Image (cartoon, helix red, strand yellow):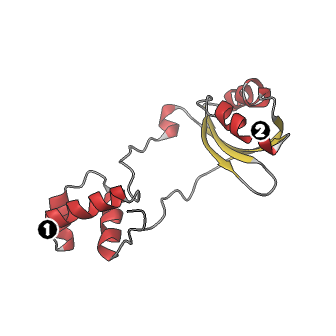
Amino acid sequence: MNNYQIDNLDKSILNALMENARAPYAELAKRFNVSAGTIHVRVEKMKQAGIMQGTRVTIDAKKLGYDVCCFIGVNLKHARDYPDTIEQLEKFEEVVEAYYTTGNYSIFIKVMTHSIEHLQDVLINKIQTIEAIQSTETLISLQNPIAREVTP
């Protein structure tokens, strides 16, 4: 069911669940003028199609002491080193996202640390110890004024 086409009701359901993933189907049914069974069927179809992938809790990293967010552009010595490098980066809990990119960098990663000192430690004792990495460039985020999911 990979080619499931969403309609306006599906979009409304997705938007409502993105706002509150725990919203009862009966409440959504009342809001969208359909039966709770219809909501259930639509949600199951979107899950089977891979459009919806579970539910998740959003964590405030700052409240857990992660005060430094940065992005690191990684240049590899050889493109063939990509899979092994990703495997090694995945072992570092501070690396929270990684992207294989075109442009100036082979890999672009998002790193969260408790402090600048912690970031320095991660760079020197973790990331830059990976043999396949030729160089890195670190960009420290000052703010994150826009953070959202795509609109269905």
- Residue 129 in percent (x, y) is at 78, 26
- Residue 133 in percent (x, y) is at 81, 36
Task: State how many labels appear.
Answer: 2
Residue at mark 2 to residue at mark 1: CA–CA distance: 53 Å
Q: Is residue 52 left or right of residue 70?
A: left
- Residue 109 in percent (x, y) is at 67, 44
Q: Are marks 2 and 1 in contact (CB under 8 Å)?
A: no
Chain-order first, disc 2 or disc 1 = 1
> Where's the N terminus, which quadrant?
bottom left
Q: Residue at x 57, y 57 (%)?
A: 145
Rate crowding at label 2 as few (under 14), some (14 to 19) or many (20 or more) other CA atoms within 10 Å: few
Q: Which mark is residue 81?
A: 2
Q: Residue tagged by mark 1?
A: 35
Q: SS for tag 1?
A: loop
Amino acid carrying label 2: it is Asp
- Residue 69 in percent (x, y) is at 63, 42
